[in-house]
Image (cartoon, rainbow, N blue to C red):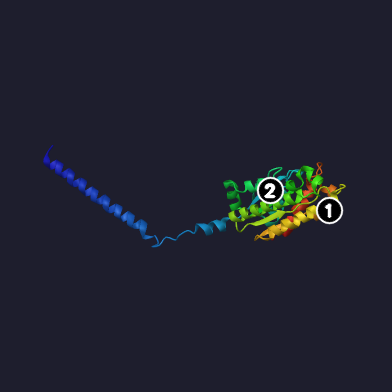
């Protein structure tokens, strides 16, 4: 190929390359011309708080937390959630971790699980029912309430309760915690009055343990069932029925600040 032709092609190629570089420089300059010198930083934490419209509730405990005996399946937790939604007009995310038959020893192990701790950490409110299976033991408590066994059982329960509340507070310092006290389902039986003394003492000691922690509220239920216990019990004569659970939910709701 003629050397002049090659030289001409080279010159033309260099020319177009220079034109392209000039155009690129102009385009980049135009792009950055309208940008601020300092780009505003986004505060992720504050945005999360502002955008958080719903409430997160975690329920811990035994069959009362599960709502056993309620024909609607809601239990006091479900009724309370409905009440909160109606009053606040906010969505509610519920994690119900209750286990039928659970004792305080079992709950103290449950709250040590990593995933349970993670759920508690996210909560705005924590609901707890525990102790009924420790004291009543499927009715066995009626047979030995006069013996020294009850005192030993209560001491172990109170130690567990203190540990459970410590674990809740360790994972979440700010959530409001509502700890539901016991009622006496056997109050109409021959030994019912004596059992009521045991339950009242049990509730008093539970309330004292709860009072040692900030923002943990003991919710009494004994009086709700005292006069008409059979009207508020399920057919097993132990768990609340739908009306009984509603009484508990209304008691908790009365303690909330809307």
Kindly identify the residue that appears in the image at 14 percent across and 44 percent down: 7
How packed mark 2 is, by other alpha carbons closer than 10 Å (few <14, some 14-19, many 20 or more), is many
Q: Residue furthest top?
A: 1
Q: Which image quarter is the C terminus in?
A: bottom right
Q: Which image quarter is the N terminus in?
A: top left
Looking at the rendered structure, the secondary structure element under dot 2 is helix
Q: Would you say 47 lies left or right of 217 here? A: left
User: Looking at the image, can residue 54 be seen?
Assistant: no
Q: Residue furthest left?
A: 3
Vertically, is 97 above or below 215? above
Vertically, is 99 above or below 38? above
Kindly identify the residue that appears in the image at 81 percent across and 54 percent down: 197
Kindly identify the residue that appears in the image at 67 percent across and 60 percent down: 212
Q: Nearer the viewer, residue 32 or 196?
A: 196
Percent x, y for residue 121? 59, 53
Residue linked to disc 1: 226
Q: Residue furthest front?
A: 148
Q: Nearer the viewer, residue 228 or 209?
A: 209
Looking at the rendered structure, the secondary structure element under dot 1 is helix
Percent x, y for residue 59? 67, 49
- In the image, which disc is placed on residue 104? 2
How packed mark 1 is, by other alpha carbons closer than 10 Å (few <14, some 14-19, many 20 or more), is some
Percent x, y for residue 203? 75, 55
Percent x, y for residue 184? 80, 50
Vertically, is 7 above or below 29? above
Q: Nearer the viewer, residue 43 or 30?
A: 43
């Amino acid at each position: 190929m003629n050397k002049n032709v090659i030289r001409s092609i080279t010159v033309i190629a260099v020319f177009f390359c220079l034109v392209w570089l000039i155009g690129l420089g102009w385009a980049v300059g135009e792009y950055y011309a309208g940008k601020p010198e300092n780009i505003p930083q986004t505060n992720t934490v504050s945005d999360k708080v502002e955008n958080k419209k719903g409430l997160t509730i975690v329920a811990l405990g035994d069959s009362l937390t599960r709502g056993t005996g309620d024909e609607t399946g809601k239990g006091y937790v479900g009724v309370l959630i409905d009440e909160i939604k109606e009053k606040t007009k906010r969505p509610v995310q519920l994690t119900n971790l209750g286990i039928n038959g659970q004792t305080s020893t079992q709950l103290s192990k449950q709250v040590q699980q990593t995933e349970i701790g993670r759920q508690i950490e996210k909560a705005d409110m924590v609901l707890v029912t525990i102790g009924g299976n420790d004291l009543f033991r499927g009715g066995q408590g009626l047979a030995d309430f006069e013996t020294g066994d009850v005192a030993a059982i209560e001491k172990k329960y109170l130690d567990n309760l203190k540990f459970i509340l410590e674990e809740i507070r360790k994972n979440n310092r700010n959530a409001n915690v509502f700890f539901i006290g016991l009622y006496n389902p056997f109050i109409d039986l021959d030994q019912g009055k004596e059992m009521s003394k045991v339950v009242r003492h049990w509730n008093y000691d539970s309330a004292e343990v709860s009072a040692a922690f900030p923002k943990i509220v003991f919710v009494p239920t004994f009086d709700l069932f005292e006069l008409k216990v059979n009207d508020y019990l399920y057919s097993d004569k132990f768990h609340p029925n739908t009306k009984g659970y509603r009484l508990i939910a209304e008691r908790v709701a009365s303690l909330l600040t809307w």
